[in-house]
Image (cartoon, grey):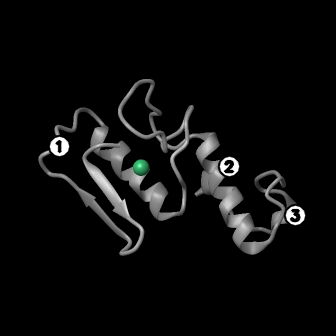
Amino acid sequence: MGGAIFRSDTRTIAVDPQWPFKGDGLVLTIEHEYGHALGLPHRQGNSIMKPGWDPPLASGPTEDDFRDLERLRNLSTGENWHAPVGSAARGSSPGPAGD
Ligand SMILES: [Zn+2]
C-alpha cells in the first residue's frame, strides 16, 4: 500500500504524512503495515495484505488474513494449523478473531 512502509530490519512502520489518504485509507494502511509487523507477506484476493490501492480493497482484516496469522502462529509453536479456531486442540487461548 502506498503512503507507508514497514521495515522488518528495524521493526519500523513509517507513514508518509504527505500521502493523500482518503476515507479510511490511513486505518487500512496501518492495518496492512501491522500485518507485515506480525509476519504476513503480501497476498492477492480478499485481504488487507493485498499490495497497492487497486480495487476491490478489503475493508479490514479478513478471514483469509486471520487464517494466515493462525498458520504463522502454529508454525512457530508447532501446532496443527488446520485445527479450527477455538478447538480443544489449540488450547484455551482466544484466536485473533475473538480478541
Ligand atoms: Zn505491504
Real-space Cα separation, disc 1 to disc 2, in angstroms? 30 Å
Query: Which is nearer the eye, 66 or 52?
Result: 52
For label 2, the residue is: 67
Quadrant position of the N terminus in the picture: top left
Q: Residue at x 74, y 73 (%)?
A: 77
Identify the mark at residue 1; answer none if there is no mark: none
Amino acid beneath label 1: Trp
With 31 as the anchor, is 73 left or right in this view?
right
Q: Position of residue 79 (x, y in %)?
A: 81, 68
For label 3, the residue is: 89
Nearer the camera: disc 3 or disc 1: 1
Query: Which is nearer the eye, 66 or 53?
Result: 53
For label 1, the residue is: 19
Q: Position of residue 28 (x, y in %)?
A: 37, 43
So how many labels did they put on this image?
3
Of the two numbered discs 1 and 2 on the same chain, state the one appearing first in sequence: 1
Q: Position of residue 84 (x, y in %)?
A: 81, 51
Ligand 1 under 8 Å from disc 2 Cβ: no
Of the two numbered discs 2 and 3 on the same chain, state the one appearing first in sequence: 2
Numbered disc 1: secondary structure: loop
The extreme front residue here reads 9
Q: Residues within 10 Å of mark 2 (few under 14, many from 20)?
A: some
